[in-house]
Amino acid sequence: MNVNAENVNYPRKLKTFNNPERFIEGWYWVIPSRKLRVYEVKPVTVLGRELVIYRGQDKRAVIFDAYCPHMGAHLAEGKVEGNELRCFFHHWKYDAEGFCVDIPCLDEPINVKAKTWPTAEKYGMIWIWTGETPQQPLPFIPELEIEECDSNFGARFITNCHPNVVMINAIDTQHFNTVHKVVSEFIFEKQELNENAITFSNVAQDGEDYFLIKLIRPFYKNPVTYSLCYWYGTTGMVTFGPDFLHFYIMFTLRLIEGGKAEGQAIFLTKKRTSIFGKMYNRFVLWLTEILTHYFIKNDSKIFQTIQFNLKTPIQADQSIIQFINHLERQKNLKWESWTMGNLERVRDGEVRDVEKRENREKWRDELVND
């Protein structure tokens, strides 16, 4: 039955959702950890902003703005020395907090600072926080919040639609029946974990006629778990499976120019350290990838052609609208301001920068990295 926008509390004016000029302040993926070796420095672009990433002797990943605050040379041309980065052009050297610690032609360096960004690693991925100090932990699946995980990566992908539009596909109950032929009534129960995270859990009985349900039904009695956990509107974690085996799939996306999305699929399972446990995890991760391809093969073409515009919301769109409302309440950043950020210089006596350093040390101590 059709209902109007007021009946389902659909916001008429959206400032963030599907907006190519705005994104949520939060954690975003950069590159897989394995692609950055110790003493290696690389250029990266995240959400349109040019950055440089390096890994020092202490094995910690560090992210700067790409250009040297002296004369604008690209720091990816430089060299990692210990835990510090030296610019190729005039050999100015910066520590992991961005402070200049050496200028060869001077007895003492002047107080200048390269712009640094909060950086962390989890699930085999390097992440960046797009604000000064992280306000939330790295994205996590509620079931695995305190667990160490093994992970595999799917192929990177680009869609012609906004990351937010890709995200809502997993809670679009209508398309489960029309596209995937799941003969079942999906009813999602919503729970907001914090300002930036929301979960949707299916509380309806699974579809007995569905191919995958028929395949695994002999091995379990309880309903299949199907739940979603969204962070910042661009990272979504799917939990799927019977009570004895849950499959975990992360789709983490970031906005690129033109309102499109660049994404990475990550397949996860709880870490097991025994020989048989490692073999079991390899099988589970392989099976997770197979299931993922099965589900998304028909959805991918939609992401290349859709021009999203929810003109006539109905009751079946309730979860999508709840997701949009949750997103609209989050702190957003302007694409232009982020990509065209000014280089920052530090002068003697600026308490502001001392506070930034202390805050970063505090949140870094609290991070749990793989």
Image: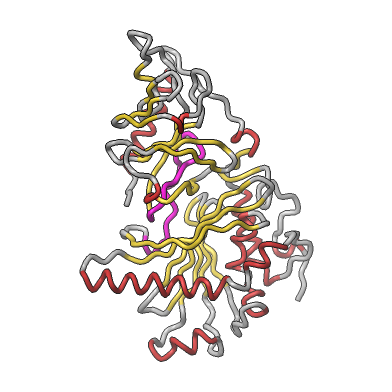
Is residue 237 one of those drawn in magenta?
no
What colour-coding does the image apply? Answer: secondary structure
Q: Position of residue 305 (x, y in %)?
A: 72, 63
Q: Residue at x 33, y 37 (%)?
A: 39
Comparing 370 with 137, the one in front is 370
Q: Residue at x 28, y 72 (%)?
A: 279
Residue 192 visible in the current orientation: yes
Comparing 156 with 222, the one in front is 156
| Image label count | 0
Q: Is residue 25 left or right of residue 111?
A: right
Q: Position of residue 66 (x, y in %)?
A: 50, 31
Q: Residue at x 65, y 74 (%)?
A: 175
Write down the region rendered in magenta. 123-144
Q: Position of residue 238 (x, y in %)?
A: 49, 66
Comparing 220 with 38, the one in front is 38
Residue placed furthest toward the left:
274
Q: Residue at x 65, y 54 (%)?
A: 162
Q: Is residue 168 above or below residue 27?
A: below
Quadrant (top left, top right, bottom left, bottom right) of the N terminus: bottom right
Q: Which quarter of the picture shows residue 77?
A: top left
Q: Is residue 55 above or below residue 226?
A: above
Q: Is residue 370 left or right of residue 222?
A: left
Q: Is residue 14 left or right of residue 291?
A: right
Q: Which quarter of the picture shows residue 11?
A: bottom right
Q: Position of residue 152 (x, y in %)?
A: 40, 62
Is residue 124 one of those drawn in magenta?
yes
